[in-house]
Image (cartoon, grey):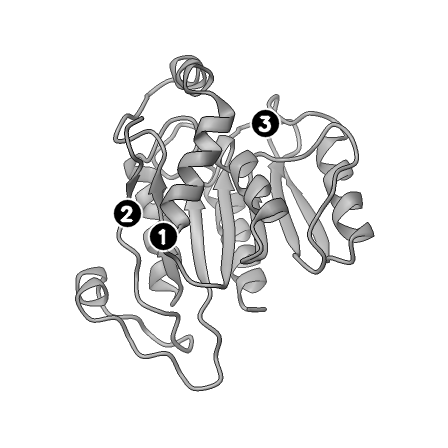
Amino acid sequence: MTPPRSGPTTGPRPARTPSPSPADTAAEPPSLPKGLPMTTLVLLHSALGRTSGMDAIAERFALAGYAVHTPDVYAGRTFDDAESAVAHSQEVGFSTLVDRVKDACEDLGADLVFGGFSLGAALAQQMGKNDPRARGVLLFHGGGFPKPTRWQVGVPVQAHFAVDDSWRSPGTIETLMESATQAGAQAEYFLYPGSTHLFSDPTTPDYREDSAELLFERALAFLDRF
């Protein structure tokens, strides 16, 4: 099995002040202020792969002051259309993709927030459900369970969908929200106007700037809890 390609992990999260350039950050991570826990945001790409759009989104979180890790569970492959992308993810197999995420995160620290886009959201919720290092889960354009599931105590989850997204399965995200809250975790999800799927990705035809900006504002507020 080809090992997953991981993107560079930015330095530990400083106070919310202007960040150095990504190159400077990678070369010399900023020091962690005393008393502030080190939490890494693990961003998992959609079925399209770790595209330039995914890298741009990761950079946005990094420039907001967060340590970001972007595993590439496709080992460099990317796709331009959903049909080919989904076919490839099915060929690899979901359990294999989960294993690749686990391998890519093996050497990370003890406090992780897992975030994912579409297929990546399904992977992120698996990590949030099972990885004891999980401190939170962000689900963008994906996620949910068809029936009640076990969830880790105290691991909050936030989800985002377009209201008429054809990829959104009715009831599944609500089931996850209920499972999480019954486990003692905070859970919330947001619906946005329209029917586009990856509306937060600025490189896709699905992109909707107003909804994307609101999504990032809410996601950053979620991350500020850690």
Task: Give above or below for 1 relative to 21.
Answer: above
Please state if 97 lies on the left or on the right of 176 as rendered: left
First along the sequence among labels 3 and 2: 2
CA gap, disc 3 and disc 2: 30 Å
CA gap, disc 3 and disc 1: 29 Å
Q: Which residue is mark 3?
A: 195
Residue shown at the point (44%, 56%) measured from the top left: 41
First along the sequence among labels 3 and 1: 1
Disc 1, disc 2: CB below 8 Å?
yes
Please state if 167 lies on the left or on the right of 92 as rendered: right
First along the sequence among labels 1 and 2: 2
Q: Which is in the foreground here, disc 3 or disc 2?
A: 2
CA gap, disc 1 and disc 2: 6 Å
Determine the image quadrant of residue 50: top left
Q: Residues within 10 Å of mark 3 (few under 14, many from 20)?
A: some
Task: Give above or below for 217 relative to 43.
Answer: below
SS at badge 1: strand
Q: Position of residue 179 (x, y in %)?
A: 78, 44
Residue shown at the point (58%, 34%) measured from the top left: 142
SS at badge 3: loop
State the residue in front, 201 or 8. 8
Q: Residues within 10 Å of mark 2 (few under 14, many from 20)?
A: some
Q: Which residue is mark 1?
A: 69
Residue shown at the point (46%, 43%) measured from the top left: 209
Q: Which residue is mark 2?
A: 7
Residue shown at the point (39%, 64%) measured from the top left: 64
State the residue in front, 139 or 93. 93
SS at badge 2: loop
